[in-house]
Image (spheres, coloured by chain):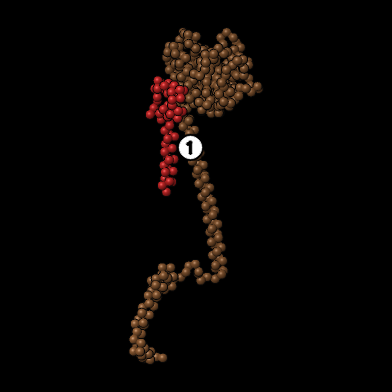
Chain colours: A brown, B red
Amino acid sequence: MDLPEILELFEHLEQNVGWFYDFLSYFVAIGLVLLFLIFIVRLWKGEVNWFGRKKECPSQPNSTPEERAELEQLIEQLQQECKQLNQAVQEKKEEIAEIKKLYIELDQCFADETYTMSQIMYAAEEVATALALREDFYLHKDDIFDHLLDYIINVLKGFREKHPCIVIHVPHSQQEDRLVHYAHSSGFGHQVKQYEPKIYGSAAGRAFRNNEVYYIPNVDDPEVEYERKPFSKKKYKSLLCVPLSAGFDKSTCIGVLSLTGKPVAAYEEIEIERTILFSKILYPLIYMDTKKGASWNGSHSSESKT
Amino acid sequence: MGVIPQKVRHELNRLYRMGEISKKQLMEEMKNGLFDHERLAVKKKWEKLFAKKIKK
């Protein structure tokens, strides 16, 4: 059937039925609308472009099984590398966190050291003042030592928990086998002045006779050389005794600085070292007062309140 | 910044003993920047470094 015959058939149908061309135009219109909608949907899904051309699907490459296997292997390798890199990043993050923590710790130690430096400077300044203004020293000896010993206590950690107290003993002028009270910090009762440690049989005595630092972490330990006083109301467990000397020569030892601490093993190495350092700062003042007092200015420490 | 007068130091010691100021306050007041320049300079560098890292 050729085109003129088809047209003739259409004419024949139109003449006999009357609605054929209307039906044909609706049919064609609906068909065109459907085709347009299908195009829009495919365009939206990305299957075709604006010109109706098919897009290449990247997920389905035209590759051989060998190439595909190679690609899969490469993906697996990359995933493995990615996993390793993630792990390395995590490790680095942990390292950075640790470094930050260490830095803060180091900075706190540094701050503590610079603070200790300031306390050393102030203590040295007050010793120098006491040496320069002797009259004033003899008049206010108790107060001066109270402030000087405060600087030592200031550089100790945990003041409230340790409740540190300091007492200084020097050789007894009448009893060769004993030491006698010279000065003390706040925190002690008046009875501290009455205690005269034995040179043999007390912690202070041991530090004095050996010219060595003697640290007792727990005075209740039966092995330690410590004088247990009957009916004592002692509130400390730790005791640090530092000889007041100029170097290793025992003959230069002029007394003992004893530091008590409330808990067992109250003091760390750095605190012990700082106490030793302060004992060296106090040495010239105590030396001048106890050994050279008379020739120094003609007066003597016995005039003092201590 | 500098040396604290003796009377102020003694007062700070007293306040610390009485528990009216903390150890941190005592340290800051006593130091008043003394001996602390290098530490603060390093701390500033450190803070700057990590501020940069956060921005990135």
Picture coordinates of residue A279 (x, y %)?
Answer: 52, 21
Residue A263, above or below A88: above
The image quadrant of residue A9 is bottom left
Residue at the image point whose x is 60% and y is 10% from the top: A176
Question: What residue is shown at x 56% (from left), y 11% (from top)?
Answer: A172
Q: Is residue A273 visible?
A: no
Q: Is B6 placed left or right of A166 in the picture?
A: left
Nearest the eye: A129 or A158: A158
* Quarter in which the N terminus of chain A is drawn: bottom left
Q: Nearer the viewer, residue A72 or A137?
A: A72
The answer to whether residue A230 is visible is: yes
Question: Looking at numbered disc 1 in the image, what kind of residue is underneath it?
Answer: Ile
Say above or below: A142 vs A156: above
Q: Quadrant of residue A234?
A: top right
Horizontal and vertical percent for residue A242? 56, 21
Residue furthest right as drawn: A223
Q: Is residue A100 above or below residue B3?
A: below
Q: Where's residue B46, x and y in %?
A: 44, 40
Q: Residue at x 51, y 42 (%)?
A: A98
Q: Quadrant of residue A210?
A: top right
As drawn, A63 above or below A164:
below
Question: How many discs appear?
Answer: 1
Q: Secondary structure at mark 1?
A: helix
| Residue A233, x across and y down, in percent | 57, 17
The residue labelled by disc 1 is: A104
User: Extreme front residue here?
Assistant: A17
How busy is the neighbourhood of tag 1: few (under 14 within 10 Å), some, or many (20 plus)?
A: few
Q: Label 1 marks which chain's residue?
A: A
The residue shown at (60%, 24%) is A218
